[in-house]
Image (cartoon, grey):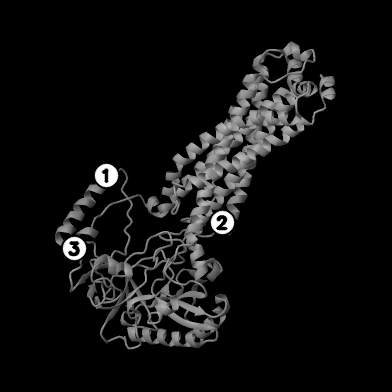
Amino acid sequence: WVSRFASDPRVIGRTIRLDGEAHTVIGVMPAGFTFPIAGADLWLPAGWGADVVSQRGAMYLGVVGRLKSGTDPGQLGAQLRTLSARLTATYPKYADYLGLRGQPFTDVVVGDTRRPLLLLGAAAILLVLIAAANATNLLLARVNGRATELAVRAALGAGRRRLARQVLTESTVLGALGGVLGAAIAAAGLAIFLRLWPGLLPRQQSVSLSLGVPLVALGVSIVIGFLVGLGPARQAVRGGLSDRLRGGKQTQSGADLRLRRGLVAGELGLATVLLTGAILLVNAIGHLRQVDPGFRPARLMTFRTQLPGASYPTGDAVGRFYDELLDRIAEAPGVDGAAAAMILPLSPDGFGGTFTSTTPTEAGAEEDRRAQMRLVTRDYFRVMGIPIQQGRSFLATDRRGGPAVLVVSGGFSKKFWPASGALGKTIKSGVQPGPDPIKGEIVGIAGDVRASGLHRDPTPVVYVLLPQVTTSAVTFVVRTTRPAGTLIPAVKALIEARDRDIVLDQVATMDEVITRSLGRPRFIMELLALFAGLAVVLATVGIYGVVSYAVAERTREIGVRIALGANRARVTRTVVAQELRWAAAGLLVGSVVAAAVAPLLASAVFGIDPAAPVLQALAAVGLLLVATAACLVPALRAARINPLTAIRAE
C-alpha cells in the first residue's frame, strides 16, 4: 500500500493485475503483518476449483486453528488422534503419513531457532557473571583505598549500618547506570543487527525492543549492583578504624585476598566455558564450509521467474517459453550453459511423496518409500556440475508425449535397491504438479546432492524432466565464464525482450545461496566469539587488577626480601606462581564444565564435535597464557622495586 499506492486511502476497490489476472483490493493489512510467512506482500483466497489437483500422499498445506476460550489442548489432541485413526483405516497405504497432531503456532514459527537463541542467552548470562565478579573486585579495592575516609565518617558518628548502606547505595547506583547504558547499547545493537542480518530469524521484520526488555534489564542491573556491593560493604564496616585514623597503612586481610582471587578464578572458569564454545563453533563452521554440496557452485548465477497463467494457460505454452529462453541465455556471451529447476539444492523448500515400483524394492515392503521430487531441464546436471554415476542424463529426445524417463540420486538407488541398483527400474509417484502421476523408467543415477542444506544429509531424490511435467514457477541456473553477477543485466534484457510482464526474483550467485544457508550458525558463532572475547578481556583485567593490588600491598615485604639478598628473578617467579595457582584452579573447573556443556552445544548447532579434547585444551591453554601475561607485568614491576625506597615509604 505504501510503496505501490503511495498510501492512497482510495485503494479499496481498485483493480490490479497479478500474473495477468484482474483482482480487486478489499483491504490493507497493518505494517509488520507477516502471517503465514515472512515477506508476504498480498493475500489471495485459496481456491478449490477443478484446476486444483490433490493427491492423498501430498502433504503441502498447513492447517491453523484458534482454540475456543477454555478449550483444553489435550482434548484437541485426542480428537486429532481419533481422526488420524479413521483416516489410517480408510487409507492404509498412507498410514505412515496420516498422523495428526497439534502444536502451538509459536513453536512452528520459531522452529529450530529456539535452541540457538537459548544458547546465546546462556552465554550472555555467563558474561554478566564475569562482569559482576570484576565489578566486585574493583569495589573491594576501592573500599580498601577509602579506609581513612570511612574511618573519619565512623569517628564523626556514622554507624556501621550507615557505612554499609553508603557502599551498597553507590554500587546499586552504578548498577542502575550500567543498566541504562546497556539498554541504549542494546537498542543500537538491535538496529545494527536488523540491518546487517535481514531475514536471519523467523518474523525478524517484527522484532523490536519492547518497553519491557529495558525495564527488566534495568531491574536485573540494579539487583546485580546491590549483590556486588555486599562484599565491599562487609569490608567497609569491619574493625580496625582506630588504626586507620592513626595513619597506619590499611592492608588487605587474608580472607579478602582469597575472596578476590576466588572471584578471578571464577571469571577464568566462566571465560573458559565461553571461549571453548566459540572455538567449537568456529571449527564447526569451518567444517561446514568444506562439506561437498554435490555440485560445483563456482560461477553459477540463479534467479526465479513465474509465468502468468493468463498468458501461458497450457503446458505446451509454458514449455515453449522456457525452451526458447534457455536457448537464448545459453547463446549469450559469457554463458557456458543454462538450465532450470522447480527447486534448487540447499533450499528449505521441499516437494516429494511416496512411490510404487513394478519391481519390489530390496529394502523390504515395510520400507518408507518416500523421496524428494525435483523437476529439471535436460541440461541441469551438466550446468550444476552434478556427476552422472551410471546410465545417462536427460536428452533432447526426452520430450512431452514421449516415453517418460527418470534420473535418481545415488542415495535413492542404494536405499531401495542396494544390491542390483535402481537403473532400469520403473517407478510411479502419485505426487506431482499435474493431473497425471509421474511414471517412468530410471535411465540414470546422479551423484547425491544436499537438497535441504549443508547441515543435512543427502535425501533420496527423483529427477523428472521439466518439459514432461509442467510448472509455471522455476529457478534458472546459469554457468558463466566470467563473474556471475555481471550477466544479470543481459539476462534481464533477454527476458524483457520476450515478455515484459515477467519479473526476475531472488537473483543471487550460488556462492551467495551457500553463504545464506550458513547465515544462522555463522551469526551464532560471531556473537559467541564476541562474548568470549569480552570475557577474556574482563578476566585479564581482573587478574591484572588483583595481582597489581596484591603487589602494591606487599611493597614493603618485597623490598625487605630484595634488601636481604633475594634474587629478583625469584621474586618474579614467586609472585606469578602464587597468582597462577588460583588461575589454574579456575581454568581446571572451567574446562570440566565446558566438556559437560559441549554436548548441549552440539544439540543446538549442527557440526559441533562435543568430543574434541584438542580444541577444548586450546581454550584452556590460551587463557593460561593470558593469565600468565596478566600476572607477569605486575610481578616484573615488583622485582624492580628499590628496597630503600620501599622501606623508607613505610
Residue pictured at 64% horizontal, 19% vertical: 254
Q: Earlier in the sequence, mark 2 or mark 1?
A: 1
In this figure, which residue is indicated by the disc labeled 2? 194
Sequence-wise, the earlier of marks 2 and 3 is: 2
Which residue is label 1 attached to? 74
The label number, if any, that marks residue 112 in the structure image: none
**Which of the 4 image quarters holds residue 310?**
bottom left
Of the pair 245 and 419, the residue shown nearer to us: 419
Pick the front one: 482 or 142: 482
Q: Image quarter for residue 531?
A: top right
Choose mark 2 or mark 3, whichever is in front: 3
Residue at x 47%, y 80% (from the top left corner): 502
Type of amino acid at the residue the image marks with label 1: Gly
Which secondary structure lies at badge 3? loop
Circle 2: element type = helix
The local secondary structure at tag 1 comes to helix
Amino acid identity at mark 3: Gly
Q: Check disc 3 and report the residue beneath it.
A: 364
Q: Position of residue 325 (x, y in %)?
A: 45, 85
Front residue of 541/21: it is 541
Residue 548, can we see it? no
Image coordinates of residue 488 in percent, x first then y, are: 55, 78
Q: Are marks 3 and 1 in contact (CB under 8 Å)?
A: no
